[in-house]
């Protein structure tokens, strides 16, 4: 009876005072639940309405492959649970946009490739399972660059056409998690999950005025996520605010026996103690090696320099010359062939799903011809390459190189007493869709992927007539997520650069 009374009481309040989902946060949603201004069902319906209006119609953002057909039923079940015993957990009724390389129980998981269009996993990826246990819902699966190959454009063979940047519909979304980022930027979901091998959490976040966290290697599990290169693969949050990214990271981080690299994770879990004054007394170094090159766009440099002024105004000391010793030599990586790599990692992933997936090798994938033509050469190259194991000379050389790089970065951070390094996440504005000739501007492939250190993107402003978003990367020491989050939170609260895209405005109020 209490459940029924709560639902009956809440419904008219929601009807009288529609809850604005645009730019809302987890905290605001939970406050609305507590005040009986909102139900999970009405929140989900509001996002479904926006998806219907903007993803395949209107601006045709083209960010989603699949909308969960059971999501309203799952939302109603959460409303019943809430009426009976309160919120399920810290992500109660958070509608998630999940990149389509995360396995999702009962929902097709394609990795962007037509050959997997009918693969429906029986088990959730570790991070998805953690989010669901905390009360979240999988609202939709996001389009991605097929196989997570491209760091620059988001197009696959399952969902025809490019995903569009909602800030400029003729511009790219910056890589393989671009579908998740476009959907979150356009307010088609509350929070998102992406993956990042070279830049695909941070790049799309930069291009679409979002917060994205690539955590320390080993803090978050990759179990149940299609691999690209496990030596560098990370999966994690893409959100509109630092606080929401921190809340999602706190839930999905942790040790997972199915991903041995996470063995130390439970000793380093991030703490949710957000401090808007965290920049006071902080020392930050500008990592010029990461972004200065002949093709760097002057507007990008100008926006970044304004961000440095804002950081100083908020109390930080910014050291503008803080080079990594021997960086030029470090850039010459060993040429002993791939260590493990795409072929090895994908074959192991598919072999573990024998009988569930339609193919198990790159040779079978190539024979199927069910992939986008623009990835054929890369698939063929990977198939011809070696599947070097962890004890191979290539892997030994790779491990030695990564350790040398880590020590050089730590030496510089110690020398200058840095809390974090800073650089613009991209050196150029988002390219036009289909443009592969102008500079791409990607600054994220080197430092965090090579060292395994955490990196976080936060919005810092806009270029090209104040229209195209730009983000700044904060690169920290290993396991420094709590500190990085606080630094980014303090900057965000001092500046509030994030604004929603004009292409996906609030919908007209529905008549009842």
Image (spheres, rainbow, N blue to C red):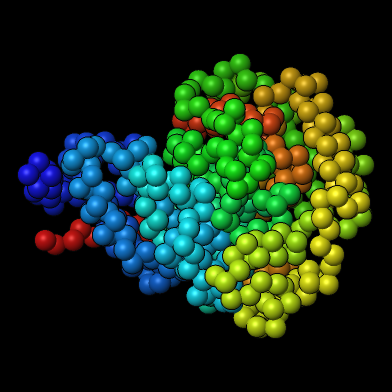
> Measured along the vertical axis of the image, is residue 231 above or below residue 167?
above
Specify whether 316 is left or right of 132: right
Q: Is residue 416 above or below residue 199?
A: above
User: In which image quadrant can residue 81 be found?
Assistant: top left
Classify residue 88 as left or right of residue 146. Answer: left
Residue, far front? 355
The x and y percentages for residue 367 are 70, 83
Quadrant placement of the C terminus = bottom left
Please, which residue is most extreme toward the top here? Answer: 281
Q: Could you say where residue 208 lies in the image, as x and y percent from the top left?
A: 52, 52
* Image point (70%, 37%), residue name: 453
Residue 108 appears in the figure: yes
Q: Quadrant of residue 340?
A: bottom right
Q: Which residue lies at the image location 50% right of the left edge and 31% below the top edge?
A: 489
Image point (50%, 42%), residue name = 252
Q: Answer with left or right where residue 185 lies relative to residue 330.
A: left
Placement of the N terminus among the 4 image quadrants: top left
Q: In which quarter of the image is residue 156?
A: bottom right
Closest to the observer: 431 or 271?
Answer: 271
**Residue 360, position as x, y percentages in the image:** 66, 71
Asked if residue 497 can be seen in this view, the reply is no
Residue at 59% across, 29% down = 268
- Viewer-closest of 43 and 264: 264
Q: Is residue 385 positioned above or below 37 on the image?
A: below
Count of marks placed on residues: 0
Residue 460 point in image, percent of width and height: 56, 40
**Side of 31 where 83 appears, left or right:** left
Q: Nearer the viewer, residue 264 or 60?
A: 264
């Amino acid at each position: 009876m209490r459940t029924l009374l709560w639902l009956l009481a809440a419904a008219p309040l929601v009807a009288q005072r529609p809850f604005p989902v645009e730019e809302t946060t987890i905290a605001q949603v939970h406050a609305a639940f507590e005040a009986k201004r909102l139900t999970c069902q009405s929140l989900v319906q509001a996002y479904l309405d926006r998806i219907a209006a903007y993803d395949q119609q209107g601006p045709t953002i083209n960010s989603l492959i699949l909308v969960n057909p059971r999501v309203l039923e799952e939302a109603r079940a959460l409303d019943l649970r809430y009426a009976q015993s309160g919120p399920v957990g810290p992500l109660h009724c958070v509608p998630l946009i999940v990149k389509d390389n995360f396995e999702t129980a009962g929902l097709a998981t394609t990795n962007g490739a037509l050959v997997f269009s009918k693969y429906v996993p029986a088990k959730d990826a570790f991070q998805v399972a953690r989010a669901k246990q905390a009360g979240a819902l999988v609202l939709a699966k996001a389009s991605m660059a097929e196989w997570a190959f491209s760091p620059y454009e988001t197009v696959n063979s399952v969902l025809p056409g490019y995903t569009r940047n909602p800030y400029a519909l003729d511009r790219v979304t910056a890589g393989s998690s671009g579908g998740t980022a476009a959907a979150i930027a356009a307010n088609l979901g509350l929070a998102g999950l992406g993956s990042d091998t070279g830049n695909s959490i941070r790049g799309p976040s930069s291009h679409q005025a979002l917060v994205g966290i690539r955590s320390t290697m080993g803090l978050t599990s990759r179990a149940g996520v299609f691999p690209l290169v496990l030596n560098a693969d990370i999966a994690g949050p893409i959100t509109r605010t630092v606080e929401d990214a921190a809340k999602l990271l706190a839930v999905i981080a942790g040790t997972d026996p199915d991903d041995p690299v996470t063995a130390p994770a439970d000793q380093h879990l991030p703490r949710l103690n957000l401090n808007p004054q965290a920049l006071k007394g902080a020392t930050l170094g500008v990592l010029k090696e990461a972004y200065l090159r002949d093709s760097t766009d002057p507007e990008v440099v100008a926006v970044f320099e304004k961000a440095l002024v804002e950081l100083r105004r908020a109390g930080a000391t910014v050291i503008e010359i803080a080079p990594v010793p021997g960086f030029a030599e470090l850039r010459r990586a060993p040429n002993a062939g791939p260590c493990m790599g795409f072929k090895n990692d994908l074959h192991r992933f598919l072999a573990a799903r024998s009988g569930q997936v339609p193919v198990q090798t790159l040779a079978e994938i190539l024979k199927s011809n069910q992939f986008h033509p623009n990835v054929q050469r890369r698939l063929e190259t990977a198939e011809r390459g070696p599947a070097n194991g962890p004890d191979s000379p290539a892997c030994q050389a790779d491990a030695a190189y990564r350790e040398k790089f880590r020590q050089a970065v730590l030496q510089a951070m110690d020398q200058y007493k840095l809390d974090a390094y800073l650089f613009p996440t991209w050196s150029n504005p988002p390219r036009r869709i289909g443009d592969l000739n102008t500079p791409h501007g990607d600054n994220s492939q080197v430092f965090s992927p090579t060292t395994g250190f955490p990196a976080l993107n936060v919005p810092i402003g806009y270029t090209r007539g104040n229209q195209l978003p730009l983000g700044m990367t904060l690169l920290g020491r290993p396991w420094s997520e709590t500190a990085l989050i606080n630094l980014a939170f303090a900057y965000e609260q001092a500046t509030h650069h994030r604004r929603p895209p004009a292409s996906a405005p609030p919908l007209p109020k529905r008549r009842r």
